[in-house]
Image (spheres, rainbow, N blue to C red):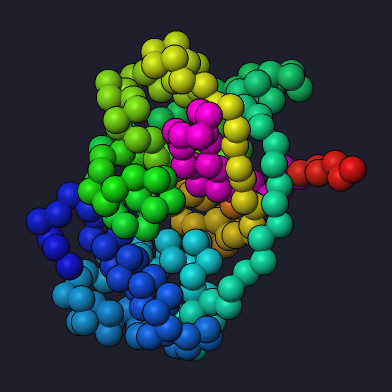
């Protein structure tokens, strides 16, 4: 692990564990070392190790069994769901007033895993934006977005507090979303998300990973946690 790198340590740990899973050093349903053991192996704090494991679980690489430990997850099946939409416009259409709170806005360097997802090079810089989406002042979604800095070099937290993100993309950078690919899966609300969404930890939610494109260029990778008690999804099959 490179503690001088701009890549956060938890992302570096994730990348290393994912490589071992893909190389089958850890096979499906194998038990991983405990948090304490990982702290010793990688010389990292328990908070850092725990964050890495939480993200790996959310990404579907591992699963936890209470009282037994953490295990490598079997490969999952992917059901494609494609629907291009904007939260802001969707809420307006049903008569709700949409608002967005920018919880955090940071500039980070991407690890190999994020770089691969976003068609970037490792250590390329992105904006990591955490937002809370509300309708009529009721919190509905907790979103973490990764935006390539090279596409939006002068983006600020203030920009996203004043206008919808896609409006900023189009008005300031002449970039619009022409296609989006989304993956849906079930998840459980984490403690930090629960506080923002006004829910209890471990309640069910929908996890949505969005890859948004302008022509063939990826302009946004967003991980959304949608309240399970507030959303349902309809897919029309023809």
Where 126 falls versus 9 (above or below)? Answer: above
- The answer to whether residue 193 is seen in the rendering is yes
Residue 203 lies left or right of residue 132; in this view the side is right
Instruction: Answer with left or right where residue 109 lies relative to residue 73.
Output: left
Who's the residue at 66% across and 32% down the image?
A: 84
Along the viewing direction, whichever of 56 and 170 lies nearer the viewer: 170
Residue 223 placement (x, y as % from top left): 50, 46
- At a point 58% along the width and 78% down the height, the residue shown is 74
Quadrant housing residue 21: bottom left
The magenta span reads 208-232
Above-or-below relation of 103 to 41: above
**Residue 179: x and y, percent?**
60, 33
Farthest residue in the left direction? 4
Please identify the quarter of the rendering in which residue 149 is found.
top left
Image height check: is 203 above or below 102?
below
Q: Residue at x 45, y 29 (%)?
A: 101
Q: Residue furthest right?
A: 238
Res 139 visible: no
Main SS, magenta residues = strand
> Where the C terminus falls, by quadrant?
top right
Left or right of residue 182: residue 117: left
Residue toward you, 145 or 45 = 145
């Amino acid at each position: 692990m490179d503690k001088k790198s701009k890549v956060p340590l938890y992302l570096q740990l994730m990348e290393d564990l994912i490589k071992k899973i893909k190389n089958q050093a850890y096979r499906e349903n194998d038990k991983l070392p405990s948090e304490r053991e990982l702290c010793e192996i990688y010389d990292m704090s328990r908070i850092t190790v725990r964050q890495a494991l939480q993200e790996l679980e959310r990404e579907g690489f591992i699963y936890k069994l209470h009282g037994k430990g953490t295990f490598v997850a079997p490969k999952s099946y992917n059901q494609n769901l494609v629907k291009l939409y904007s939260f802001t416009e969707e809420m307006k259409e049903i008569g709700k007033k949409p608002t967005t709170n920018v919880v955090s806005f940071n500039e980070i360097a991407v690890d190999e895993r994020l770089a691969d997802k976003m068609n970037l090079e490792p250590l390329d810089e992105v904006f990591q934006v955490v937002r809370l989406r509300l309708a009529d002042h009721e919190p509905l979604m907790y979103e973490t977005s990764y935006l390539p800095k090279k596409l939006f070099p002068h983006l600020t937290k203030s920009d996203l507090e004043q206008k919808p993100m896609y409006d900023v993309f189009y008005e300031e950078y002449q970039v619009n979303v022409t296609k989006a690919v989304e993956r849906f899966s079930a998840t459980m609300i984490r403690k930090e998300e629960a506080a923002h969404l006004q829910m209890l930890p471990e309640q069910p939610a929908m996890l949505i990973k969005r890859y948004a494109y302008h022509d063939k260029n990826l302009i946004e990778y967003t991980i959304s946690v949608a309240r399970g008690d507030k959303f349902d999804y309809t897919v029309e099959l023809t």
